[in-house]
Amino acid sequence: MARRYVTLLLRLQTAQGQPLVPSALRVQLTMVGMPLMPVPRVVLHPLGPGRYTARVLFVMGGAWEAVVQVRAGRRQAALDLPFRVGA
């Protein structure tokens, strides 16, 4: 697979289904099984309350993982999301 841009969409909600607007939000990408692989930079852009997008350039297809870190007030959470890029 050649270089490929992928659009990431992220929606944050409270347990009650209300949009969550965090005080801090970060997405870190890693390629599964390739700890030395350069990681794409993720710059999140707000689309509305609790909704974000990022256009990310991947130089290699395969299995990837996104670690989403959220802080809202004194509460923090992190979520690991596996996904694939390419066929």
Image: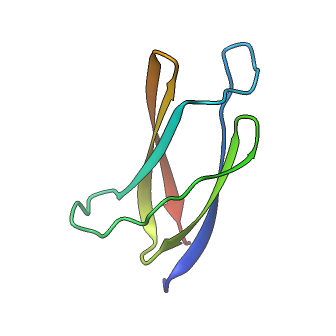
Figure quadrant of residue 8: bottom right
Give the residue drawn at x 28%, y 69%: 37
**How far across and down, in percent of the image, does residue 73 sit?**
52, 18
Q: Which residue is most to the bottom?
A: 2
Residue 67 is situated, as x and y percent measured from the top left of the image, at 42, 43
User: Residue at the spot x=75%, y=20% of the render?
Assistant: 17
**Lateral position of residue 40 relative to residue 14, left or right:** left
Quadrant into which the C terminus falls: bottom right
Residue drawn at (67%, 19%) of the image: 14
Compared with 79, 5 (above or below) is below
Q: Is residue 58 depicted above or below 7 in this figure?
A: below
Which of 24/87 is in front? 24
Residue beneath the point at 49% across and 86% down: 2
Q: Residue farthest to the left?
A: 36
The vertical placement of 24 against 28, above or below, is above
Q: Is residue 29 above or below residue 56?
A: above
Q: Quadrant of residue 15?
A: top right
Q: Nearer the viewer, residue 21 or 81?
A: 21
Q: How many marks?
A: 0
Measuring from the top left, give residue 60's x and y in whole percent.
42, 75
Image coloring type:
rainbow
- Residue 28: image x %, image y %? 41, 50
